[in-house]
Image: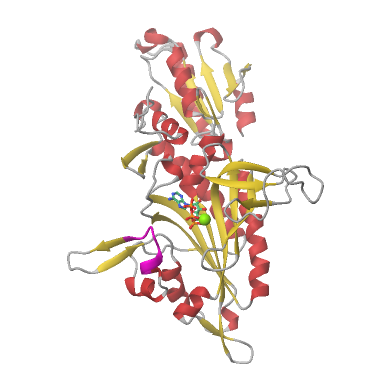
């Protein structure tokens, strides 16, 4: 992609009312633009990050038998009345149509998936079943001051699983914990498996919490990794000695990037979702639900991976792998193109041909300092420079390091391949 053509350019300052680091940097880097409070547009760079995260999530959900589908956002009020959540779900957006009909605007999808699954689940032979979607959710959040960490509109992956009994459900729940860890590991986030309230569904659920000062949640956890609990339900306080000898339990601010819940028969009961067991007896289906906040995850990555110059994307979620820059100043704009420009263009073509995702800062009227500052702000892991000084060689630099190396194009392609 040529930077000169890219929709979304860098800016020196963010709007004053964007307080969160993720919102400031993503605005300045040209990844997002706010529509109204708690609602963001994702520009091409931001959309590429989302797609990277979605594909990691898809990969891991498909690997454990998840089938992807897409459910409706405008939902059925009757279904929400059946579960009691038309009244009890605080953040539910209630839409009134011009014909005076009312629709819940989906904050979650149990009320859609359970009646749908009921059309297809008849016998124990239809179970287990796991379906998921990546879809925009709407929640009328009272506070929406954390940039994309807490939106009124946001992207979530939600998976629902259906089982013949608790034993089969418990087995899948453990498989899911592992799949979640894979997702967060691949996004280079350390997500701590944390006991949390099960809400109206069951005693406990499990959250995946990423430690960072900008987090809205708090956990008490053992640095040895064998215990973590949301402070809301924690049976112990910080400072207590870990039972397994790992020292004192600590307290930290965190971002909840995922949450998995046993639903037991809460929703199958409400909708009469049963299957015929081996003896032909109608039996309630046991369910679980599993969420990952895709856009929140993107925000969490920015909160963890930044410095005073900008973002440092882990390569697995970076919008591009290489940020190619050519230096030459105004003389480069001369026609025919200067040698620097020709080498840079050729490098760009070679990278594209090798299927390497490259953002090419092809601007002619911009100083080296500005180009470097923009590359640091955008945060692509590798910067490659072509300049008059080093025409034959490309200067290779990692975003996270200050060291530079001069490489032949073959070596560049080998390293990126
Ligand atoms: P929170 O406690 O932060 O309000 P929640 O527990 O209500 O979130 P869940 O219903 O568990 O959220 O949703 C699953 C996941 O969706 C969360 O773990 C989180 O990553 C993400 N998520 C929830 N609400 C938002 C939001 N308003 N904006 C962005 N992501 C969200
Ligand atoms: Mg939650």
Please state which of residues 241 and 308 is positioned toward the viewer in this rendering.
241
Kindly tell me whether residue 307 is visible in this rendering: yes
Which region of the structure is painted magenta?
Answer: 86-93
- Residue 144 found in image quarter: top left
Q: How is the image coloured?
A: secondary structure
Q: Is residue 109 above or below residue 266?
A: above
Please state which of residues 227 and 340 is positioned toward the viewer in this rendering.
227
Q: Position of residue 333 (x, y in %)?
A: 36, 12
Q: Is residue 145 left or right of residue 203?
A: left
Where is the C terminus found, in terms of image quarters?
Answer: top right
Q: Is residue 329 left or right of residue 304?
A: left
Q: Position of residue 325 (x, y in %)?
A: 48, 20
Q: State the residue at coordinates (54%, 39%).
A: 301
Q: State the residue at coordinates (44%, 35%).
A: 20
Please state which of residues 291 and 337 is positioned toward the viewer in this rendering.
291
- Residue 235 found in image quarter: bottom right
Q: Is residue 141 above or below residue 100?
A: above
320 in the magenta segment: no
Q: Position of residue 122 (x, y in %)?
A: 52, 84
Q: Is residue 208 above or below residue 370?
A: below
Where is the N terminus found, in terms of image quarters?
Answer: top left
Q: Residue furthest right?
A: 245
Kindly tell me whether residue 119 is visible in this rendering: no
Q: State the residue at coordinates (64%, 88%).
A: 278
Q: State the residue at coordinates (57%, 43%).
A: 254
Q: Position of residue 345 (x, y in %)?
A: 45, 22
Q: Is residue 286 above or below residue 346?
A: below
Please state which of residues 76 and 264 is positioned toward the viewer in this rendering.
264
């Amino acid at each position: 992609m040529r930077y000169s053509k890219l929709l979304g350019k860098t800016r020196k300052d963010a709007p004053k009312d964007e307080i969160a680091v993720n919102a400031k940097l993503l605005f300045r880097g040209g990844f997002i633009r706010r529509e109204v409070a708690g609602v963001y547009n994702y520009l091409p760079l931001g959309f590429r990050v989302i797609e990277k995260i979605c594909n990691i999530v898809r990969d891991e959900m498909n690997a454990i038998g998840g089938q992807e589908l897409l459910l409706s956002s405008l939902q059925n009020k009757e279904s929400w009345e059946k579960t009691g959540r038309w009244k009890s779900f605080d953040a539910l957006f209630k839409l009134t149509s011009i014909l005076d009909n009312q629709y819940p605007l989906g904050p979650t999808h149990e009320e859609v998936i359970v009646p749908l699954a009921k059309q297809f689940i008849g016998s124990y032979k239809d179970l287990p079943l796991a379906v998921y979607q990546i879809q925009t959710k709407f929640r009328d959040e009272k506070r929406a001051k954390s940039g994309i960490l807490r939106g009124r509109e946001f992207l979530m992956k939600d998976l629902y699983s259906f089982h013949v009994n608790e034993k089969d459900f418990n087995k899948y729940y453990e498989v899911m914990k592992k799949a979640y860890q894979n997702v967060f590991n691949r996004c280079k986030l350390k997500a701590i498996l944390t006991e949390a309230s099960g809400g109206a569904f069951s005693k406990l659920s499990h959250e995946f919490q990423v430690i960072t000062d900008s987090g809205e949640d708090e956990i008490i956890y053992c640095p040895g990794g064998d215990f973590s609990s949301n402070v809301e339900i924690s049976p112990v306080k910080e400072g207590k000695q870990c039972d397994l000898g790992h020292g004192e339990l600590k307290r930290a601010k965190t971002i909840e990037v995922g949450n998995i819940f046993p639903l037991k028969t809460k929703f199958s009961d409400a909708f009469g979702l049963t299957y015929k067991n081996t003896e032909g007896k109608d039996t309630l289906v046991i369910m679980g639900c599993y969420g990952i906040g895709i856009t929140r995850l993107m925000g969490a990555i920015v909160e963890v991976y930044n410095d005073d110059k900008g973002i440092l994307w882990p390569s697995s979620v970076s919008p591009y792998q290489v940020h190619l820059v050519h230096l030459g100043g105004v003389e480069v704009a001369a026609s025919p193109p200067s040698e620097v420009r020709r080498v840079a263009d050729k490098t760009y073509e070679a990278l594209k041909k090798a299927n390497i995702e490259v953002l090419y800062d092809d601007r002619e009227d911009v100083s080296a300092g500005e180009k470097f500052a923009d590359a640091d702000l955008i945060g692509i892991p590798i910067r490659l420079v072509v300049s008059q000084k080093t025409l034959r060689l490309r200067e290779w630099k990692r975003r996270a390091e200050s060291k530079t190396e001069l490489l032949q194009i073959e070596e560049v392609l080998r390293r990126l391949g």
